[in-house]
Image (cartoon, rainbow, N blue to C red):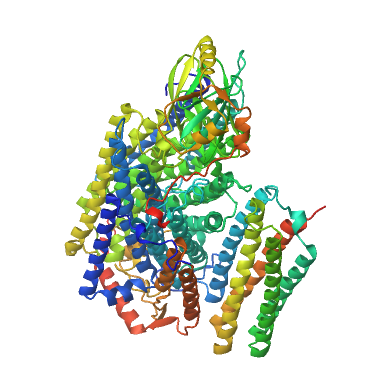
Amino acid sequence: MDPVGPVGQAEKTILINSTAIMLAIVIPVIIATIAFAWWFRRGNTKATYRPDWEYSGAIEMVVWAIPALTIMLLGGITWIGSHDLEPSKPLPSKTQPLKVDVVSLDWKWLFIYPDQGVATVNQLVVPAGVPVSYRLTSATVWNSFFVPQMGTMIYTMPRMTTQLHLQADKPGVYDGLSSHYSGEGFSGMQFKVHAVPPQAFAAWAQGARGSQLKLDGAGYAELSKPSSYVKPITYGAVVPGLFDAIVTNRVPAPAVQHNKPISGPGA
Amino acid sequence: MTTEAATIGLTHSGSEDTGLGDRGPQSKSIVVPYGFWLFVLSDMVLFSALFATYASLVHATDGGPTTNQLFDRNLVAIETMALLLSSFVCGLAMITAKRANMLWTQVWLVLTGVLGLVFLGIELHEFASMIAEGAPPQRSAFLSSFFTLVGCHGAHVTAGLMWLGTMMAQIWAKGFREDIVRRLLCFSIFWHALDIIWVAIFTIVYLIGTLP
Amino acid sequence: MNLLGKLTWHAIPFDQPIALVTGLVVVLALGAILGWITVKGHWPYLWHEYITSTDHKRIGIMYIVLALVMLMRGFADAIMMRAQQTVAIGQSQGYLPPEHYDQIFSAHGTIMIFFMAMPFIIGLMNFVVPLQLGVRDVAFPTMNNVSFWLTASGALLINVSLVVGEFARTGWLAFPPLSEKAFSPGVGVDYYLVALQISGVGTLLTGVNFVTTILKIRAPGMSYLRMPVFCWTSLASNLLIIAAFPILTATLAMLMLDRYLGFHFFTNDGGGNSMLYMNLIWAWGHPEVYILVLPAFGTFSEVVSTFSGKPLFGYRSMVFATLAICIISFMVWLHHFFTMGAGADVNAIFGIASMVIAVPTGVKIFNWLFTMYGGRVRFTVPMHYALGFIVTFAIGGLTGVLLAIPPVDFVVHNSLFLVAHFHNVIIGAVVFGVMAGYTYWFPKAFGFTLDERIGKAVFWCWFIGFYLAFMPLYVLGLFGATRRMQHIPDASWEPWLIVAMIGALFVLAAIVLTVVQLIHSIKTRDQRRDITGDPWDGRTLEWLTLSPPPHYNFAVLPDVHGEEAYWTRKQTAIKLDRLIDEPDYKPIEMPINTPTGVICAFFASVCGFAVIWYIWWLAILGLIGAFAVFVWYAWRDEHEHVIPVEEVKANARERRRIRQEHLQSLSQSV
């Protein structure tokens, strides 16, 4: 409800407008329910009892028309909104979008910056006021990449790529999480998004390249081991094409058992 | 008094005909097959889900065998003939059953079963050879969906044959009692429905799958 | 080859105190009940009057008993979840580790939908529909019995998972790839799959049974447009069952093939496609919620019209709206995964289709309002639920339409907002509906009404409890809180969660009071006997019989003239101050009892348990047993017994005598 980017802002507007439109009908209905029930209670001799009144063409027409018209209006909002806010649609901007590849693992988030040649875990640094173009996948099971204040979430699915475009208008730290249950460590998949001024972002990327950690085959194998509530990690180098390798399953992943039976070896 | 009472329903003179069979509850000879048809329709929904799955996964061969490499149209033609003939013979059994002819009913029913077994035999042979050539259902999503769709039909045929055996024994032991003939009618509905599903499988899986 | 498959002593949760203690309590309680029944010698009565009964009324009662018991199990899960989320904030991990919490929320959803809500509405339909249609029973009484016992078998297996092994940790729909062998190697998902497959067969047979009954077995003169609205909604619901449940069967079967035989429908490798599961399961899942809600709407139509003293407003409109909802419910399934990335066109079309359902639903609400308009409203307990429903459902519908707008869903999908929405509509419509139906039709089933005062307290506890428990969740969803969290990341959410916990305690009170109400009402039943069979001044044919009705319902099937068959007949009798002429009584043939259902379910349970634990020889034995039951049942020669005309006559004359005595008081609105 406190959006910091154009996507989240637009979604909030639609939510509020649609709610208002519908409340215009729902509130009178609720009042009418209570009012009719009360006025026509059996003890009220002032109310006219019409035991045979069970049909009125005029009322039927109104009763069908009100919801129909409302839905037509909301339908229009839906059509336009779905197209304007389609996740795979790039955001209008004068700046070139930053590319980030996102991989959901068990149970943490890997962010690869293909153009900067660095990667992070559970920490997403983006330049404020710059659109970010995400490609997303999952190494194991479905998750959902979600930064509530930036807006739209999208599923991450193994062997498939989804696309998302988001932007943080102003600098700040925003919460991120997975919004699709993925097993034991699901609750520990929180991450922080640091939106920083563009120069600060460039500086950060430069500094990140100094990290000794490398995200190569061995590093990725290590990262793939099940873990949760993982503290942020920064990799100074990433083996090229890692994201594509994950999507096409060419990266050897160790066997991961999520929901290990808790009743011992009998299962 | 009587006419007024009749119009306002205080007597038991029959209700006016409002059409759509409102003469009261229908007889069992209508109700039972009707209910069975509904069940058959639900079975068709089940097969629809499997067809939809097949259509989604037919190209998901994971680098393994494809439709063109696997299907033998000749064998499929033979098993189709067997099944269709089986349905025809089943129809003959229904006719002789209505006439309470024990000998010929059992003859036609045996033939129904034998032809059904021929169908099953060919199908099992097809499955076995596919598995032997490295195309088991575990090889790819396409093969999983093929084996399941065709296999589900085969499982229905198997269940039908077990039902047929029971019916034959029952007719032999108890004769052509009304409820037994009703059950035979339901069996024949089931058997013909399996034919319909087979035509769909034959077309979508085998014919379309082996287009050049 | 291990004789017991995967089953070992390790399957019993000796190392988890909560599960162990709960399991122990359940086993002891069950043992105590069974022991008491044995000691008091009640088995012959139960066996003959209920377990082997083919009487739709008895079967309906058994369904509702199952539902009420499973309500307690499902709610126990709910309270544990609420408690965990109230304490597991910040540093604390709460008292339930993820492995346990994840089973609890999966069990909560599975039990509430499949073994509480479905049995409750099927139970109500079972009891009421043949009576309202003016006939003696459903089309296939033995199959009806089998349907119930298969459902019970599924419920049994779910509960066994508490003590032997574990339950699924994949949510109530078990999405792959998480539910595949690679990521869930334990028996939990197998328990889930097997239990649902078994009870799914039962439900499908119910669908066939009721569609046949409603379309082919009605009293003379009852054309389609003279059927009570409850029968129309039951028809729509059962048509949906026939059309949707096979999809569930197929989909769960495919997941089982993946898990048991290494197939690749939804796996990550071999070309499997987990998106396919999403589509298939929701193609079933969305009609499922309409299967639940339509009979609730029907119940409210009966309740509102009876307690307003007026016919239902806009009957044909209501019928049309019901059928429209039935059909459209099949065209909206994608709204459950707008965030899967199907593209703007697809998302928008399904979003608009989802909203279109709000139109006939809105029409229904307006028609209920206008039924009250010009009426004489009596604030009985069922009417409380009806009014509570209209208010609550309006809000739930609003949030539903909001969720149907893809850009909105993009930020609240899978959040606590969603959780609040679906509980809003399920509690507001289905739970309130079954509670209203339970109270409304209770006297018909048992011959006395439930205590009104406690009943109103139950309602208010549900009403207040619902709002306290779920309104905060709407807010939290808008704050970005997602669902199924074992641990709460943001401490500022705590006050909202505490309010939600208080709401849950109110609901706990409601459930406890329901039990209290039942026990107290039984003890004091003589004060509230339903002598005439028409305690509410009803309008439909079930109120024509005494309470409880004889096994065969009606001595002679009533002739139906016009809508509201019973009401017109009653008003005529009052106006002319005499009952309808005495008809010609004949002996009545009714289906005999049968143990087929319970034995079939026994073998199904054995086979199911064996499949779950990989005990193949036992599974095969179970299948053979089931087939043997089928053949043995098919071999029987006697299907019916005859009720002699003297008995029919005696019962009918007693009814006429009572009715004659109360002729004047039968209409309270004069």
Viewer can see residue C559: no
C574 or C52: nearer the viewer: C52
Question: What is the tally of numbered marks visible in this picture?
Answer: 0
Viewer can see residue B18: yes
C278 or C298: nearer the viewer: C278
- Asked if residue C590 is positioned above or below residue A235 in the image, the reply reads below
Q: Residue at x 45, y 64 (%)?
A: C5
- Asked if residue B172 is positioned above or below residue C578 in the image, the reply reads below
Q: Residue furthest right?
A: B212
- Image quarter (top left, top right, bottom left or bottom right) of the N terminus of chain A: top left
- Image quarter (top left, top right, bottom left or bottom right) of the C terminus of chain A: bottom left
Q: Is residue C524 left or right of residue C230?
A: left
- Asked if residue C74 is positioned above or below residue A181 in the image, the reply reads below
Residue C196, percent from left and from top: 46, 58
Residue C417, percent from left and from top: 41, 35
Residue A15, percent from left and from top: 47, 27
Q: Is residue A128 left or right of residue C522?
A: right
- Asked if residue C216 is positioned above or below residue C261 in the image, the reply reads below
Residue C383, percent from left and from top: 31, 49
Q: Quadrant of residue C164?
A: bottom left
Q: Quadrant of residue B155?
A: bottom right
Q: Residue at x 36, y 84 (%)?
A: C644
C106 or C112: nearer the viewer: C106
